[in-house]
Amino acid sequence: YLFRATVSGYVLEAASGRAFKQMIIVHRLGNGVDEQESEEQAVSLAADAFAREAFIRVNEWAHRREERGDPFLVRFLAVADYGEARVLRKVLEGVPSLSAAVQKSISIGDPEVENTSEVSVIYKGSVEGLCVAVRRALAGGTISLVASVRPRGRHLVEVRLSHDGPAGKLKGGELGSD
């Protein structure tokens, strides 16, 4: 007996649901002394070939992602105003190994909700490395803010700002003193 099996499918990125590449289609033939044995062999051969091809595509994707960097979200809490949010995004743009700092959301002035600013970035490194880089960027340069920087999961950095430290306050995007 001769049996033909086709295995097809996509390899998806879990975070976005997008396929790495086009559909993988594998055809294999199997033979045996009866129909069931022939079918099992064909399916087994096709599934093995599909798994090898899927692994190759995941590996290629991982190398490309490593070169490009990973997406992260940096969430600033206790932001004073829109000017400060703009300055904080500019500070992130100066972080080494970081690219594509894009303002994702901002909430200022709602008495029911804490003022927040969320910036999406691409960073070549770990979430811990990004925390260290953000801490350094906030402590140095033209502004200096007292902040608590910590990871919240694998792709989120939370920065709680304190405007009552020795660094002074940002007012309208400019460093001022009390």
Image: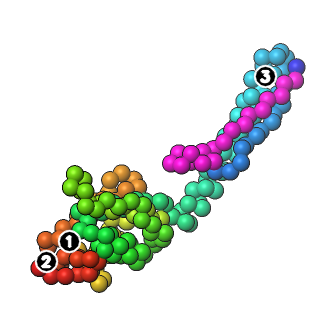
Label 3 amino acid? Glu
Q: Which residue is mark 3?
A: 39
For residue 70, side relative to residue 173 (left or right): right
- The image quadrant where one finds the N terminus is top right
Is mark 2 in CB contact (under 8 Å) with mark 1?
A: yes
- The image quadrant where one finds the C terminus is bottom left
Residue 144 lies, in percent from the top left, at 24, 78
Examine the rendering and report whether any part of residue 161 can be seen: yes
| 29 shown above or below 74 | above
Mark 3 or mark 2, whichever is nearer to me: 2
Q: Which residue is mark 2?
A: 166
Q: 35 or 79, which is in the foreground?
A: 79
Label 2 amino acid? Pro
Real-space Cα distance between discs 3 and 2?
Answer: 74 Å
Residue 162 lies, in percent from the top left, at 18, 67
Q: Earlier in the sequence, mark 3 or mark 2?
A: 3
Q: 162 or 47, which is in the foreground?
A: 162
Magenta residue check for 155: no
Q: Quadrant of residue 132?
A: bottom left
Q: Quadrant of residue 135?
A: bottom left
Q: Which residue is mark 1?
A: 146
Q: Earlier in the sequence, mark 1 or mark 3?
A: 3
Q: Residue at x 23, y 68 (%)?
A: 80
Q: Which mark is residue 98?
A: none
Mark 1 or mark 3, whichever is nearer to me: 1
Residue 51 lies, in percent from the top left, at 67, 40
Q: Which residues are magenta?
A: 2-19
Label 1 amino acid? Val
For residue 68, side relative to residue 88 (left or right): right
